[in-house]
Image (cartoon, coloured by chain):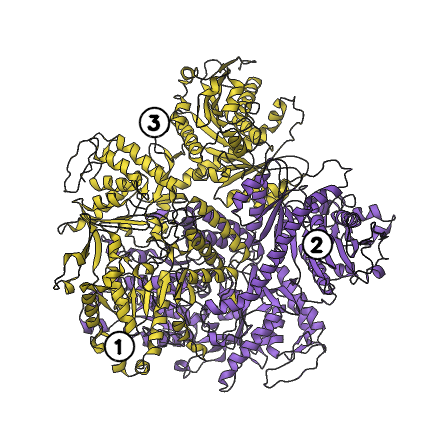
Chain colours: A purple, B yellow
Amino acid sequence: MFPLSSLIRCHRHSHSRHYLLLHRLLKPFSSIATHPQAPPSSPLGDVPLSFPTYLICSSNTSVGKTLVSAGLAASFLLSSDFHPNKFLYLKPVQTGFPSDSDSRFVFSKLSSLASRRKIACSLLASDEVLQASRSAAAVTLPAGLAEDCKFGMFDLGSYTECRVLGEEGSAASELICRTMFAWKEAVSPHLAAERENGVVEDSTVLEVLQRCLLEAGLAKQNMNMFSVVETAGGVASPGPSGTLQCDLYRPLRLPAILVGDGRLGGISGTISAYESLKVRGYDVVAVVIEDHGLVNEVPLSSYFRKRVPVLVLPSIPQDPSNDLMEWFDDACVVFDSLFKIMLSAYSERIRRLHDMPKKAGNVIWWPFTQHKLVPEGGVTVIDSRCGENFAVFKVRNNEVITQQFDACASWWTQGPDATLQTELARDMGYAAARFGHVMFPENVYEPALECAELLLEGVGKGWASRTYFSDNGSTAIEIALKMAFRKFSSDDGSLSNFLSDDSTQRRAQLMVLALNGSYHGDTLGAMEAQAPSAYTGFLQQPWYTGRGLFLDPPTVFLCNNIWNISLPEGLLSHSLNSDEITFSSRSEVFELSRDKSNLAEIYSSHISNALTQNPESVGIIGALILEPVIQGAGGMLMVDPLFQRVLVNECRNRKIPIIFDEVFTGFWRLGIESAAELLYCVPDIACFAKLMTGGIVPLAATLATSAVFDSFLEDSKLKALLHGHSYSAHAMGCTAAAKSIKWFKDPQTNGNITSEGKLLKELWDEKLVSQISSHPAVQRVVALGTLCALELRAEGSNAGYGSMYASSLLKKLREDGIYTRPLGNVIYFMCGPCTSPEICRQHESDVAERSQLAKYPRTYGPDSTALIWPSGNEVGILSLGLLLYLASVFFRRGIGDLVFQEFQSERFDLGI
Amino acid sequence: MFPLSSLIRCHRHSHSRHYLLLHRLLKPFSSIATHPQAPPSSPLGDVPLSFPTYLICSSNTSVGKTLVSAGLAASFLLSSDFHPNKFLYLKPVQTGFPSDSDSRFVFSKLSSLASRRKIACSLLASDEVLQASRSAAAVTLPAGLAEDCKFGMFDLGSYTECRVLGEEGSAASELICRTMFAWKEAVSPHLAAERENGVVEDSTVLEVLQRCLLEAGLAKQNMNMFSVVETAGGVASPGPSGTLQCDLYRPLRLPAILVGDGRLGGISGTISAYESLKVRGYDVVAVVIEDHGLVNEVPLSSYFRKRVPVLVLPSIPQDPSNDLMEWFDDACVVFDSLFKIMLSAYSERIRRLHDMPKKAGNVIWWPFTQHKLVPEGGVTVIDSRCGENFAVFKVRNNEVITQQFDACASWWTQGPDATLQTELARDMGYAAARFGHVMFPENVYEPALECAELLLEGVGKGWASRTYFSDNGSTAIEIALKMAFRKFSSDDGSLSNFLSDDSTQRRAQLMVLALNGSYHGDTLGAMEAQAPSAYTGFLQQPWYTGRGLFLDPPTVFLCNNIWNISLPEGLLSHSLNSDEITFSSRSEVFELSRDKSNLAEIYSSHISNALTQNPESVGIIGALILEPVIQGAGGMLMVDPLFQRVLVNECRNRKIPIIFDEVFTGFWRLGIESAAELLYCVPDIACFAKLMTGGIVPLAATLATSAVFDSFLEDSKLKALLHGHSYSAHAMGCTAAAKSIKWFKDPQTNGNITSEGKLLKELWDEKLVSQISSHPAVQRVVALGTLCALELRAEGSNAGYGSMYASSLLKKLREDGIYTRPLGNVIYFMCGPCTSPEICRQHESDVAERSQLAKYPRTYGPDSTALIWPSGNEVGILSLGLLLYLASVFFRRGIGDLVFQEFQSERFDLGI
């Protein structure tokens, strides 16, 4: 039935002669690897899911990763069930080359096994090495040829092919083995790379790896395909740049097979390696160990509680001359099982990813979401996050996991880059293991104390003396209000009036002074302190009454390259010099010298008037509450800092306690640790949440002065502040907060901190921001700290416009790898306080690449803001171009200039 | 100055002859080890802090742990700085014995080094082996002697002593080396223990280890002391019972030294081992590796970011005949550095532990705490938690870390035992690494979906179709109220009235129907739904008005061994048969047949009357809200389930949406997953939090029926439920919840689940509970699920009584290892749904032990409830005895009987 002996033909090619031969398989690969500016066939960051791809890791070196890879290839290619198949073996990092080459090992073993076993269809096996260090390349190449060495690495492009004939006329299965980067010395890759002057950046390794997978997926031609990526050394061995491999490959989050250790001590090494993978967010699908007679699988299985199967391979012959053919035969049944487990885990994952949107639509009730308007297919499946990016499941032509920059910072909470996320993950494991959660009142434990101390030394410096913990911004505000009212009541002699049950007296309620457009949370107490809005109507909260005096604030914004103050109606009658309400730079807006301006006086008397209204009609003002500088949910409105400062002073003069709601603005969101510093004044009480934990778990803090604290000191427990939540000061939140607070402000860990240590570097290119502000489609721009917001003109009463516009915009942006959530016609981008320049450069180059594809003429769409945006072969709308343009200048001054010129050239006219 | 050659005298003793010789050093140790019922010198669970104790761990076997231990001993004992000193080397688990003995190695190397180096004071070194398996013992003992074998282990008690003379007349330093348990085969301890029929339980290992440390501390006689505990194999190698060593030693949470691996692949192994320690809550103070020429310390230091120093030992000679004397000399400087790092970390830790209460008192503002009443020294320093226990820092005679059972379940949140805590810790690391937190609306990710599905299949089964996530019980209630009012408004034709701005119409507000004594949270919306109380006064929340019709509920309790219904005043006029208001068993109270009783009719008409009051005066009832079965914060009041069922039915008939607040009662707190099941009725909306995540991070869920959900489906986004928090459905919370929900209900992981799978086993001994209920000092008892509460009679108007009583009670209990927080005169104990029988047995034996010390006659104190409680040589009050008595019967039927009889005997009369 099968030919008894297969015909083996092998080709071996050296550099520069392999292109033609490779042509049938894929386009010249090494050229892609070294020329990243070539047009990508798919967006970068995609990982194909149309076939299974596994990371093969191990607990240590020399425990048999490559044997497992080869065994899997044999199960897939040489059994009779699956034909014709294609197996891709990738070895991104190889040291000890060329004497050690795992891809050659897999190639040669499979070739031998194929000829040994009866195979149904032919096998075409190949082994390729893309790049090698000069020293490694010099071993295989004629003298002098390895001189042409870019970036310290040489385009080796060695290629070996072998064909094993199967049953006559049958189609051929394929084995593609590929070593991506190789070094000569048999040491850890970081050492070899350093010693051989051939360091390869993480991004290059990832990029080449992704392209290998994508190309193979495109070329699979209806064959069943299976792929493994074999790491070097143990799970936490450094890669060529020094980054640990478990961190290096994390953005792809491939499911992993852990090759454990069956020897004495191997239980521990296997479990620890597994835990290192877990605390980096990997899914380990199976563990494989070699039998050493110690039944290590028993304690391992017990540890895994059946969640991860443990497979045992027969003992590997120690004799180096053994060709392992018999061993592979013996191990065949184990590899077949392993292969089935992997295949079934893959199918299960794909099935779940497909089912998730529908299931979510059936069981979840999303906040702030009209479920009737969530379109079929409009649900985003987030497979994971890595630093600033979501990994999102998409069905394009095929299933992929693609990257989306989280430009809304997940409701403004996010701070960590990938490094901090890994650190926080380990810390979360530690905090849960050390404390879980423990009772807080009258107790002390390290994370709570450290966090409280850091808050008082940081955002509370100079004024706060106490930290009150709660769960979120809204509860922090409710606590702040209780504090403020008590302070006010104890300062105010009329306290007894309030306490009286007499109905006339009670009508003169305690109220807050607040600004229109403010937002402080969704629980009733926090809502009562904000002005009526869509969120406060009877249908939303029948109990809302709005217990405040709400003033219209003057706002500041950039328009036509000028910073303007927009005065509310009540102040419009005043005649002011233009230099009091227009500024050529943002810093002028914040200048303390404005205190001496006419405008300051006008503000002061305006506020004074408001505060002296009859308390019988409006209530007694017992607290001032405001968001310093920027009103977030109100639409990223920048309030005139002079107005807020005057407001604070007026209230302080009247002994009205001052609450700063820094839930959004705190922790470097506005480029400074506390936004209060931008106002040059301090509150009595301030609330923090969101970014405080780095964006990892909910935790809030209400800080207060000692005077506020003292107003609760009495002999009776009933006079204490009786507000608490079960998880007050929970150890995990406090641990995350302590870590993040320190991380963000330390120039050692946050490269964005200026030398003075008080400010973030300017993250937005001022010139570009001002040019955007001059665009006719743009109403206003505010760029401050990690935030860049712009309001698009939404003219007329076209009420449906906003929502439709936003939804198409959202969709386009997400296709282009940017996840954002506009606030009506206000669009914003937000990064983390330590988002790295590398990511900015990556965004920049992505956009630059795409802009080169722009060959479309400028046209106008149905409304005046429309303009062409090229995205593949689709035509988009202006603001998308504008936004991606913004994305291109994301974070860094100077970087954007180049891109800007691209846009201004004939190739693509943005219309700015 | 020093004698050039020291005189070495060695003694070697075999079993049964060593007592006399040991006499000077400590009392016969092996007798303590094998007779745990001997009176302890200190409470079990204490770890002394009066000297440094370190865990010596390693990333693998054979990387040099014992060399490090010996090097540290040399630094401490043989340098001229510290004299006379005492070094305790403990090897809890030794395999390969007697040919391998790490304690003998340390002993002999130190003896040799002492004689080689010039030492100031003499050194008395000893090596002792406490217990060995029969096979191991048989090697060293005369034939037949190893037959006397208890628990599979033999009291070997081999002892070797060696004295090295130093400078004449000087005091002697001491080296005590001790192997606790030894097995013959050189394999993993779990294998050796199993094969040699000598399994030692984890509790025994810990107990012997703790006693070794405590005894040594007591005997240190003003000498400087230092101690190391050397583990076997790698960090996650199994101990003798199969428990991983990092888990086995976790209750002591000793600071650790990690001996890493300097070989190829060693970076990975070292980092992974470190991470396994971290995700179990250990602090690693330093990492030590051997130099193998690969400069592994560079990537390791980079990984540790200076937080953990990495020290490099010189290469170890491979020749087995080398006595290592020169190597120790070469390595001396490294060991001296390491030793200083360890000493300084110890001092820093002690300093911080001492400072923490004061610092906390200065910067923290505790919830529900009158700071003026927090006594000096009244702050509990919680160093960590392990399962149900806090590890608390105490200064008794000396500093110790002591264990306290968390009997208030940290504000009723706690569920995990030590095993689940470890699992959750790893999952928390995973969730943080995989997701951190990601934006929720219109998105789906695995933990949120899985958690939502589990909730609907579990506590929402049969009625709920949607899950709305928020952060805590209070926010879950605010969301529930918004849901209920919308549902009511859309069902009710008078909706338009409410929407009108006409002031007359608006006065007829939407109100809740609720029960007096209820509690739903501290945010204003949740507070408004509860009856006026100490928490709702003007001084606490000036905005509170109490928007509800609050009914007095009939309560149920056990008193004098009878379950009684206490009717509120409004129902007292009805004449009822005693069989309608008294029951001989708790199950009768829950019987559905009571629906046909007169009482049901009385309830029904009572409620009906209340609901037909004039809406102009009381408002329109738009929701019913209640805590099913038990009102927690109200004082652990059990409400008559019949009354609640009738209430639900009456409201359902009137289309008033029903909200169950299961924040406290949910997830097995009352012995069943949802307390609603005890009422035999379902709500429209229910709130869950607290135990939902197993007690690890805040997360809440509001479940709703599809009819409630549908009332928000409109074409406008403004009709959606516009309530959300930044961390809605955060991945870590959902991951913890999904794990805990499954863990608690799975008989494989929760041994307390009955065979039917719907109920927890009865955790309290019914007979004892009923006897307590007959005690004159006890007003009432409620025992249900994980809760046992009793109300002490607090007669007269002695207002200050409660608080003083509670505070002394608190203090005494904590001294006795039980951390509780009474609710006024209501005292309760709470365990987790899967608290293991082992822990109960431990509590039982603790109390039994102490009760034997009771020799005091029964007396009466200044009030009638006083009785003697023996605690060391102090005299306490009755309720303390009662409580510890309760503690002794904690969780398990039957176990308590024995203890009860102890108390009833002449030795101690409880007066029950």
Q: Quadrant of residue B259?
A: top right
Q: Are marks 1 and 3 on the same chain?
A: no
- Between the C-alphas of marks 1 and 2, the distance is 84 Å
Instruction: Determine the secondary structure under disc 3.
Output: loop
Q: Nearer the viewer, mark 1 or mark 3?
A: 3
Q: Which residue is mark 3?
A: B38
In the depicted structure, whether residue A464 falls above or below residue A313: below
Q: Which residue is mark 2?
A: A76
- Between the C-alphas of marks 1 and 3, the distance is 78 Å
Q: Are marks 1 and 2 in contact (CB under 8 Å)?
A: no
Which amino acid type is shown beneath numbered disc 2? Phe
Please indicate whether residue A38 sits to the left or right of residue A713 in the image.
right
**Horizontal and vertical percent position of residue A473:** 41, 63
- Between the C-alphas of marks 2 and 3, the distance is 64 Å
Q: Are marks 2 and 3 on the same chain?
A: no
Mark closest to the chain's N terminus, 1 or 2? 2
Q: Quadrant of the C terminus of chain A?
A: bottom right
**Horizontal and vertical percent position of residue A328:** 72, 44
Q: Which residue is mark 1?
A: A614
Q: Quadrant of residue A250?
A: bottom right
Q: Nearer the viewer, residue A533 or A553?
A: A533
Indicate the chain on which mark 2 is placed: A
In the depicted structure, whether residue A266 falls above or below residue A729: above
Which amino acid type is shown beneath numbered disc 1? Asn
**Horizontal and vertical percent position of residue A707:** 31, 57
In the depicted structure, whether residue A685 falls above or below residue A95: below
Q: Nearer the viewer, residue A712 or A201?
A: A201
Instruction: Determine the secondary structure under disc 2.
Output: helix
Q: Nearer the viewer, residue B678 or A52?
A: B678
Please indicate whether residue A869 sits to the left or right of residue B572 in the image.
right
